[in-house]
Structure formats: structure tokens, C-alpha cells
Image (cartoon, rainbow, N blue to C red):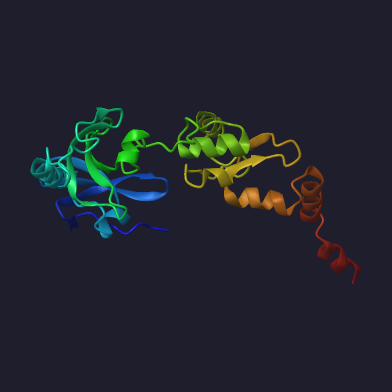
Amino acid sequence: MTAISEIGNKYGRLTVISRAENKDRKAMWNCLCDCGNAKVVSGTHLRTNHVQSCGCYHSEVITQIGRLNKGKSDNRGKPRLYENYDGVLGKVVGTLNRSEQNGAVMYLVKCAKCGEIHTRNAKHLKQSQEAQDCKFYKPPNWSGFEREDAIIRRQYGISMDEFRELLNLQGNGCAICSKPITALRRRMNIDHCHETNQVRGILCSSCNTGLGHLGDNIAGLQRALKYLQNPPFTKYALAR
């Protein structure tokens, strides 16, 4: 599917200047913020106003809120538990005027990894739970490999580097028809033996599907070759 062109469009403080490399099959766009910083944003996040600046606007608002709330205590005159937190997740720079439904205080934390401001409650800080909107966030069950790499390692037993090397060995095309193969839909292009699970090569979707329809074995291909060399209609026509 062709991505909707966003070049020249303006969303909040961001102006789209060019197309960026896709990420997780999402169309990404190079944007220039009014403050002069560059930021890569997905088309979905732009159109839904999920991202409207390089982060400068959010930082300005959060910093201002932090200044207003810094040092405040609760109604009992006691300091908030993590008001002076400075640890694994970063440093608390203030609190929000609102709290969660259960009454938990929401802290404004300057992230130790990305430097942006995230909202965390006391439980998050106590258990060192990272904010998922941090650009360096990795889930607790992360294998140590990027998403596509982890998937093909699990399904086919090869790494992304091995995939690229094999594709390069094939001349960056299908091992049967030589049609160029892009990195898109790479998992569907890895051909393997269904009995041994051994990877055989990288095929275009058409050739990969064709092998499956012919039984994925030499006998099926030989029958198809025999059919092409000796079409039944030729014998039928000669017999008439």
C-alpha cells in the first residue's frame, strides 16, 4: 500500500520535509520543528496529533508545571514520598496538579535515557518501571534483538545479518526467478524445508507459493516439467 504523502504538511510545530525509512512497517517522515530541531515521526502520529513538536513544547509545559509544583506537600504537611527522587529512571522535576483515580501522585520525571519528561507514579519509581513512551524503551521480555531480527531467529533460526548475506549471495533477487527482493515482507520470502526446518534460500512470494502448490518436493516439480514438455493436448490432437 502506498503511503499518503505528507511532504509540506504542518502539524503543530512540525513541518514534514521528506520521507524517512519505514519502521515496523509504518511510514516515517522527517520533520523540522519550529525550534530548529529535526524529528522522525510516523504518519499516523502526525495525522492524529499524537506528536506535534520535537518534544520542546511538551518540555516547556512540563517544566513550567514542575516549577509551580516543586516543593509542594500534601494536605497533611508531609513531603511527597518521591519528591526528591533521583535514580535509575531519572530525576523528579515536579508533580502534576492531577492524580490518578486511586489518589496516587503523578511525578514528572526527566528520563535518564532519552532526557524527555515522563509521568510516573510512586509504584513505577519504586519498581523502576520505565515509561513506554521513552524512545529507548524495551519490554521486560525483550530478547536482546530488534523485532524483525528476533522474529526470524525464532521462526527460521537465522539472524538478520545472515538474511542480508544470503540475499547478497543471491544477487539481491529471488533464487529461482531472480526478481529483486526488498527487505519488506522478508519473513514470507525465507524458504525452508518443512521436514527439517532447514533454510534453503530466499524466494519472491510468487515462487515461494508456487513451490508449495507443487508439493514442495522434487517429484512435484518433475511432474510439472513433464507436463510442460509433453502437454496432453498435443497427444490428443495427434490422435484425432
**Does residue 9 appear left or right of residue 187 in this picture?**
left
Outermost bottom residue: 240
Identify which residue is drawn at 60% across, 52% down.
Answer: 206
**Residue 64 visible here:** yes
How many numbered circles are shown? Answer: 0
Identify which residue is drawn at 70% across, 51% down.
Answer: 212
Which corner quadrant of the image does residue 175 belong to? top right
Outermost right residue: 239
Quadrant of image for the C terminus: bottom right
**Does residue 16 appear left or right of residue 135 in this picture?**
left
**Does residue 120 appear left or right of residue 156 in this picture?**
left
Provide residue 96's location: percent of width, then percent of height: 18, 47
**Residue 203 visible here:** no
Provide residue 194's location: percent of width, then percent of height: 73, 42
In the image, residue 103 sits, relative to residue 129, either above or below, namely below
**Does residue 94 appear left or right of residue 169 in this picture?**
left
Identify which residue is drawn at 30% across, 40% down.
Answer: 122
Closer to us: 195 or 58: 58
Closer to us: 71 or 209: 71
Provide residue 21's location: percent of width, then percent of height: 34, 43
Closer to us: 157 or 115: 115
Provide residue 235's location: percent of width, then percent of height: 87, 63
Identify which residue is drawn at 42% across, 58% down.
Answer: 1
